Amino acid sequence: MTFIGTGYLGITYAACYADLGYEVLGVDIDAAKIAKLNNGDVPIHEPGLDELLRRNLAAGRLSFTTDYQRAAEFGDVHFICVGTPQREGSTGADLSYVENAVLSLVPHLHRKALIVGKSTVPVGTAQWVEDLVAKHAPADSGVEVAWSPEFLQEGFAVEDVLRPNRIVVGVKTAWADALLYAAHKGVFDLAATEDREVPVVTTDFATAELAKVAANAFLATKISFINAMAEVCEAAGADVTHLARAIGHDPRIGNRFLQSGIGFGGGCLPKDIRAFQTRAQELGAGEALRFLHEVDLINLRRRTRVVHLAAELLDRPAGPGGPGLTGLKIAVLGATFKPNTDDIRDAPALAVAGMLAKTGAKVTIYDPQGMDNARHALPGAEYAASLDEAVTGADLVCVLTEWAEFRNADPAALAELVAGQRVIDGKNCLDAAQWRAAGWEYRGMGRP
Ligand code: UDX
């Protein structure tokens, strides 16, 4: 099998499926990245991936190439794993990488093969890909298309690929269905050895495509729901973390994805809910997803909330142009959109750091893994080499990504370093009582 596009998705799938015993080729147009991967260097931070990559390169089951002709000759199943970012100047998805991947591959396919879309796409894309294939594949090659969205979470990507909680396949023929079963057999066999079953949902193209965006829309809505409750708690003097527990014990609601804070970010949820709305509008069903606009707004409001909290804590009431924090030093702990990744795409932490810097404050950022990416994305900010360095002399500490290093930090020791003992817990991840006992003025999100 081949995995086309060696981002988070493609690299993780390629390494995991090689580990399951398949012969795997990873494909990308970025020659520097391919050279790195062939050398055993993972260009992203993802727990467990380095070892998996090196082990399978060494075993000869895995390699990487920029050569589409080689990929076409090699693969029976070609998984499209390229990015579908938000289109410049629009809320829709940019499908040019999908189009380029398909057009680069199919003219070289001289035997029957299956192209399987994994990327998150607007509903209707699979059909469009099938039409492209019909137009550009050599006559009588019999190339078919299927869609099987991925649901992996960064930080748990290896686990999610090897032990998925479900597999969704959109197919049109029994041949494609059987080949996809064979392509996932390693995952089913692993589950069997662990006395588990992996549920498979077999459906049509459109439903398979929608399954992914619907799942992400639900998760985003759940997070914005609890953040909306946080806003109400702020007005009413209630505690949203207790509220989340109080409702989450109901199994119909469930306590996962009910953590309030500065909202969701990352390369998927924000852009996916926007692209989903755009696509629904194109289909004449825009009204059905109007609530996702509200989900987006609630999410973005949480970022502004941190700036207002900072002004409140620092006793600098907002002027007409927003809060002015000139002359104050703020330590921002966290830059990545969540812990255990170096991904800073649409990271709430970095967005808040940028907003705080705009108030005139001197902002110093520290993140255990995201420093290189953050420096690139927010070059104007200052960066510290350690947690201690970041907080030294700070008037305010903002914890904006719930890394274990921050959750486990000793508030008494940090108190010795700061200029003022004020902390904003942007992810409600600190032990408020412990910080208060150490003399800190503590403010969480949606907490009294
Ligand atoms: C998400 C989906 O979970 C995954 O299934 C899909 O394939 C891709 O998009 P990911 O982007 O890796 O995965 O991150 P996820 O763990 O879902 O977190 C998204 C954002 O929501 C993060 O910024 C996280 O901090 C935030 N979040 C999550 C909350 O604010 N509260 C929560 O309770 C959970």
Image (cartoon, grey):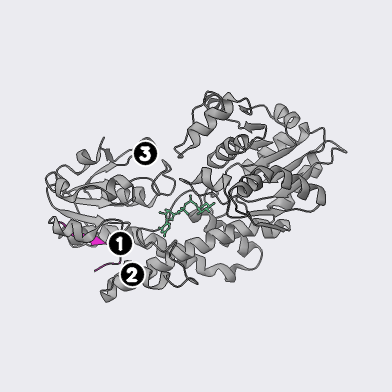
In the image, residue 120 sits, relative to residue 68, either above or below, namely: below
Q: How many marks?
A: 3
Q: Where is the C terminus found, in terms of image quarters?
A: bottom left
In this rendering, the label closer to the viewer, 1 or 2:
2
In the image, residue 226 sits, relative to residue 400, either above or below, namely: below
Closer-to-camera residue (32/85): 32
Q: CA distance from mark 1 to mark 3?
A: 26 Å
- Residue at numbered disc 2: 231
Q: Which mark is residue 113?
A: none
CB of mark 3 within 8 Å of CB of mark 2?
Answer: no
- Residue at numbered disc 3: 369
Magenta-drawn segment = 440-448
Image point (56%, 25%), residue name: 38
- Residue at numbered disc 1: 305
Q: Is residue 331 left or right of residue 404?
A: left
The answer to whether mark 3 is within 8 Å of ligand 1 is no
**Rendering coords of residue 255 (x, y %):** 43, 65
Q: Amino acid at mark 3?
A: Gln
Q: Is residue 195 left or right of residue 327?
A: right
Residue 285 lies in the magenta stretch: no
Element class at badge 1: helix
Q: Amino acid at mark 2?
A: Glu
Image point (35%, 47%), residue name: 350
Image point (72%, 35%), residue name: 105
Q: Where is the N terminus found, in terms of image quarters?
A: top right
Q: Amino acid at mark 1?
A: Arg
CB of mark 1 within 8 Å of CB of mark 2?
Answer: yes
Q: Answer few, some or many: residues within 10 Å of disc 2's Cα (few below 14, many 20 plus, some between 14 and 19).
A: many
Q: CA distance from mark 3 to mark 2?
A: 31 Å
